[in-house]
Image (cartoon, grey):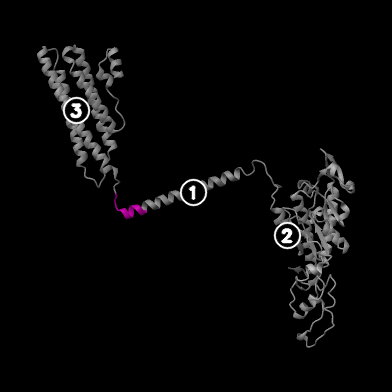
């Protein structure tokens, strides 16, 4: 309605303003042409009181209508394919209807141009005939549109299947080859991008990964000031909590906190590694103790490396001074110099009469909570190694290691280094045993019958090949 009023104000005929542009699909084209013909019929009803230029505008509209009809024909040829399996009579009927449509349009055009200036009675009669022709023309157009819409919704909506098995197999092969080629191209592109951008950005070669301190702990030769500094081993406690015995280990003060001298820490840690290595080399038993939360994994891993014992729960008072009462019922395992278990019933009975085993060296990662254990070790002459912070008395342990006992990373580093040192000692001991050199004293007071050699001895000492290792023989509950 707005377009119609604008055309009247501009002096144009409404049919010209309402005439649509030919769209790109056949269905929309038919709809637009139908709207144009309705406007043309409405304009023809008013021509009996208008001048001759009105008929000229109607003629122009009819001329455009003929062009639209040809456009419909061309669009129909492009948008409606003719499948081989579908009979072509439907498309042919549509083409015949369009041909008749064009002929009727030409006839209407000829009749209109032959009209000219005539009396009003003749004009009214001619206009009525034009209106009737336009109405018939409109009905034919609607019929053609309905037939074409039904044809498009019907056969053309279903794909034509020719030789389903062969075509499906061929299509699947083509699709598989296409997908394979696409995946290969994408992979080669990814490899190219990865190789070209591999050197870009920041390289974090020495990034901290917590699990590596347990799976691959550092060895004594890997002790450096950078490793200790990265593990926060230099941080002490507040200056108000310091112990005067640690003054020789303190480097300075920072923000009210004592800073430990890492060069002294590294020297004391190397000395402790040497002690652990010598004890395990001579067949000694090393006990690793750490009862703070988070220290259990470090303690267990160090004990496995050094083939010793571990304790990550509360220390039972009297386990050393009164060990016969607390650990007297524990099972003992007897091994030879190559760590092979010796199963001799007579030796098992003789071992039950002997006193329980005591550790030859104790490594304590938190001496402040285990001062009772350290006191028992002192009473029995057992050397100890402990991590001493600035608020602890360094005289509690035999070999102090000044470091931050509150840092789990520092504890993991120290425990891993000491465990590696014990592993080196055990390896050196077995290598010497394979060469016939026994690095520890054989057990005394044990005898058994050697039936394989044809003699028995009740007082002969245990030969080196079946001697009891004080380090490898462990009491197990």
Where residue 457 sits, quadrant-wise, is bottom right
Q: What secondary structure is marked by label 2?
A: helix
216 lies left or right of 390 = left
Residue at numbered disc 2: 300
Q: Nearer the viewer, mark 1 or mark 2?
A: 2
Q: Secondary structure at mark 1?
A: helix
> Cβ–Cβ below 8 Å for labels 2 and 3?
no
Is residue 188 toward the left or the right of residue 305 in the image? left
Q: Sequence order check: which comes first, mark 2 or mark 3? A: 3
As drawn, 193 above or below 419: above
- Disc 2 packing (10 Å; few <14; some 14–19; many ≥20): many
- In-image side of 30 versus 171 (left or right): left
The structure residue drawn at horizontal position 17% and vertical position 12%, both measured from the top left corner, is 49
Numbered tag placed on residue 138 in the rendering: 3
Secondary structure, magenta segment, majority class: helix
Residue at horizontal 75 percent and vertical 80 percent from the top? 345
Marks 2 and 3, Cα distance to the nearest angstrom? 96 Å
- The answer to whether one can see residue 413 in this image is yes
Image coordinates of residue 221 in percent, x first then y, are 80, 55
Q: CA distance from mark 1 to mark 3?
A: 56 Å
Residue 183 bears which disc, if any? Answer: 1
Q: Position of residue 343 (x, y in %)?
A: 73, 77
The magenta region covers 161-169
- The residue at the point 26 percent across, 29 percent down is 31
């Amino acid at each position: 309605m707005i377009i119609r009023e604008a055309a009247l104000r501009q002096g144009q005929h409404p049919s010209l303003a309402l005439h649509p542009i030919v769209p790109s699909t056949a269905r929309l084209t038919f709809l637009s042409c139908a709207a144009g013909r309705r406007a043309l019929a409405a304009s023809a009803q008013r021509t009996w009181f208008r001048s001759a230029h009105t008929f000229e505008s109607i003629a122009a509209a009819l001329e455009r209508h003929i062009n639209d009809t040809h456009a419909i024909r061309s669009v129909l040829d492009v948008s409606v394919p003719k499948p081989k399996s579908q009979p072509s009579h439907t498309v042919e009927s549509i083409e015949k209807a369009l041909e008749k449509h064009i002929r009727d349009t030409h006839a209407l055009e000829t009749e209109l141009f032959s009209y000219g200036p005539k009396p009003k009675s003749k004009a009214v009669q001619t206009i009525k005939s034009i209106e009737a022709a336009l109405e018939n023309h409109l009905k034919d157009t609607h019929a053609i549109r309905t037939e074409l819409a039904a044809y498009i919704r019907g056969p053309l909506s279903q794909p034509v299947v020719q030789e389903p098995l062969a075509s499906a197999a061929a299509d699947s092969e083509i699709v598989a080859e296409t997908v394979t080629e696409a995946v290969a191209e994408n992979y080669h592109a990814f490899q190219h991008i990865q190789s070209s951008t591999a050197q870009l950005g920041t390289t974090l070669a020495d990034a901290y990964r917590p699990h590596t301190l347990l799976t691959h702990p550092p060895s004594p030769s890997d002790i450096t000031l950078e490793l200790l500094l990265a593990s926060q081993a230099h941080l002490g406690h507040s200056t108000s909590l310091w112990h005067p015995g640690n003054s020789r280990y303190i480097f300075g003060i920072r923000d009210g906190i004592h800073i430990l001298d890492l060069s002294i820490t590294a020297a004391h840690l190397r000395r402790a590694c040497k002690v652990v290595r010598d004890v395990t080399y001579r067949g000694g038993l090393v006990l690793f103790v750490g009862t703070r939360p988070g220290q259990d994994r470090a303690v267990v891993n160090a004990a496995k490396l050094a083939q010793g014992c571990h304790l990550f729960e509360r220390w039972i008072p009297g386990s050393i001074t009164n060990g016969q009462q607390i650990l007297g019922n524990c099972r003992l395992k007897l091994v030879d110099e190559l760590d092979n278990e010796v199963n001799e019933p007579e030796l098992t009975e003789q071992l039950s009469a002997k006193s329980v085993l005591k550790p030859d060296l104790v490594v304590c990662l938190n001496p402040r909570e285990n001062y009772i254990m350290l006191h028992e070790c002192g009473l029995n002459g057992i050397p100890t190694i402990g991590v001493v912070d600035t608020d602890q008395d360094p005289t509690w342990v035999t070999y102090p290691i000044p470091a931050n006992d509150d840092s789990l990373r520092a504890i993991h580093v120290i425990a891993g280094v000491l465990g590696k040192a014990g592993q080196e000692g055990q390896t050196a001991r077995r290598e010497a045993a394979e060469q016939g050199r026994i690095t520890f004293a054989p057990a005394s007071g044990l005898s058994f019958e050697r039936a394989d050699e044809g003699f028995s001895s009740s007082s002969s000492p245990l030969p080196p090949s079946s001697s009891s290792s004080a380090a490898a023989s462990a009491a197990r509950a």
